[in-house]
Amino acid sequence: MSASAGWRRSWHASTRRTPTPTSLPVRPTTTRSARADRVTDRSPATDAAAALLGALVAQGVRHLVVSPGSRSQALALAAAELDRRGLAQLHVRIDERVAGFTALGIGRESGMPAAVICTSGTAVANLLPAALEAHHAGVPLLLLTADRPPELRGVGANQTTRQPGLFALAARHETDLPVPEETDPDGTAEQTAMLRAVAAQAVEEAIGAGTRAAGPVHLNLPYREPLAGPLPAWFAAEAAAVPVPAAPAEEGEEESFGALYQGGGGIGEADVATDPEPLPHLLVRGPRTVVIAGSDAGPDAEQLAHLGGWPLVAEVVSGARFGRQLVHGYRELLRDPALGGAVERAVVLGHPTLSREVTALLSRADVEVVALRGPGEPLNLNGESLAVDALAVEPGDTDREWLGAWLRASREASVDLTPPAPDADALASAEPQRRLGAIDAELAVARERVDRTLLVDAVWRATWPHDRLVFGSSRLVRVADQVLGGKKVRVHANRGLAGIDGTIATALGVAAASQADGRPGVTRVLLGDLALLHDVGALLAAPGEPEPRIQVIVGNDGGGTIFDGLEVAQIAGPEAMDRVQYTPQTVRLEQLALAYGWEYHRVTTRSALDQVLTSPSGGRQLIEVPLER
């Protein structure tokens, strides 16, 4: 910050221009040869872009997401050169909102920020949804927004608005950098050194410095013309000096826990770091305890439940929905006075959002709530919750009566969605009627029409640890949370603000990061038809980029049926309910897939769905599953 402040003072002192009102500048006549020569002239904007992007790559940034624009051309061309040299992977998206969520997905999967680059004006505003989600979910993200120089702000200049501060309530760090004034012949200029320091700080803040959560960082980059020129000779050496990215944090002692994020604050507090606690918070034996695993809790929640001997209530988006302590049908059990009503302490990891029963539990004044501190607002639904940086379990005996009561109820509440096994004896029987009966039973299973429960189960069964599963904020994620059993798979969902926007773009970012360097696996996206249509622009693939292995599975019930289960359905008249809540749609998804170059499948039976989900996938597939309202 001190370096950039110094550059800003220098600019104000030496380069502010006052136009002469009594005369107009006369543009000299320029010949074609003179214009050709000028194209080869060096550009301060290009040298500054090269210094910044080269330093970001040297700090471990591997993905650059670019939306085209004039003011950002120096950044875009430098990014293209880094991709050409194999030093970073370039993703081009014409829609800045899609670009922002693509970068968000990369950060979600890799733990390292992707840098998203855009031009000035409304392009910048389109990054705000992804920035807010990154803030609330603790996802690293770098926003590099090109801008007009300061003398053009506030005077009616084209495509110019007040970009500095646009992300202030969400950004971990932001700065309005000085306008580059000079070229750098050898990579040793003061401006280049300043930009390298800015890049180092930006990456550090984005991944979460100290106790602060990971999140978005905004670098506003004003440039004057000429906006592009040849890249400096030192650029290749700058970018090639790439250190090995920092390894993920080592797991702590067996009884000490911390999620992937630690520290952070809410809206208005994003730039305030908390002082680290000297010791983990000790969870003493005695209180009847449940462990609540919300979105992005990760395996730590399961390990904590295992060590404490406590029931584990794990949302399907938590990454902790596995293990012997996992509670099936937790919503019903939390409503049971003998179980949920008897809870004395709830230990929360991640961000729980999928059930009203968990919200009701965490809002009770008679329940001690201990929440591992994460991104966004500190969890405090009952006004007395305790936010901590780390957790430890007191040695001692498990309350077997308490745990046993939950696990017995869990077994009774679990849903067995396994298709019935074929009757091998009957199929091989010499009795025609018995054999025909077994064949009819097999055909009935194969022809069973897919409903929401069968859909989520089929996708869950098809997904394995080397795959990735992304849930949209649609009705299907709540169905999955109600009926699916335990399985240790990598799950992503934008539950920071739980919006439907950006789901496909996020999944494409997840696929890009998880499949980098030839790694195996398929990324599956399970979402509703409105979430698909809201992010339909993400289906557009850029020529020349690696083809992701991705299956977008759309439960198409013709509109927003999630509202049918909410209070509004009991209040609104049928016509108003359909028009402003259900919002019916009749889009032909097959033609949509064809227009964007996706392979299309429409399936209605369980056997057809299983077949398409598990067949080798070599590219982009859109799988439509019609559902009843």
Image (cartoon, rainbow, N blue to C red):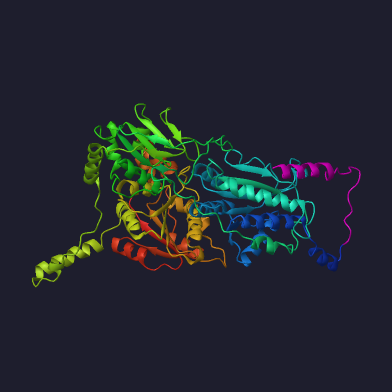
Q: Is residue 613 left or right of residue 187?
A: left
Q: Nearer the viewer, residue 437 or 46?
A: 46
Farthest bottom residue in view: 430
Looking at the image, which is closer to me, 207 or 360?
Answer: 207
Q: Position of residue 258 (x, y in %)?
A: 44, 43
Q: Is residue 585 above or below residue 232?
A: above
- Which quadrant would residue 351 be assigned to in this image? top left
Q: Residue at x 64, y 43 (%)?
A: 174
Classify residue 364 by image quadrant.
Answer: top left
- Residue 596: image location, x then y, percent: 51, 63
Residue 34 is situated, as x and y percent measured from the top left of the image, at: 85, 66
Q: Quadrant of residue 345?
A: top left
541 left or right, relative to 354: right
Q: Residue furthest left?
A: 431
State whether residue 112 appears in this view: yes
**Magenta span includes 495:** no
Q: Give me the residue at 57% from left, 66% from top.
A: 543
Q: Position of residue 187 (x, y in %)?
A: 74, 58
Q: On the rendered image, what quadrant is the N terminus found in? A: top right
Side of 133 relative to 187 (left or right): left
Q: How many marks?
A: 0
Q: Which residues are magenta?
A: 1-29
Picture layout, residue 98 above or below residue 544: above
Question: 344 left or right of 622?
Answer: left
Q: Is residue 120 visible?
A: no
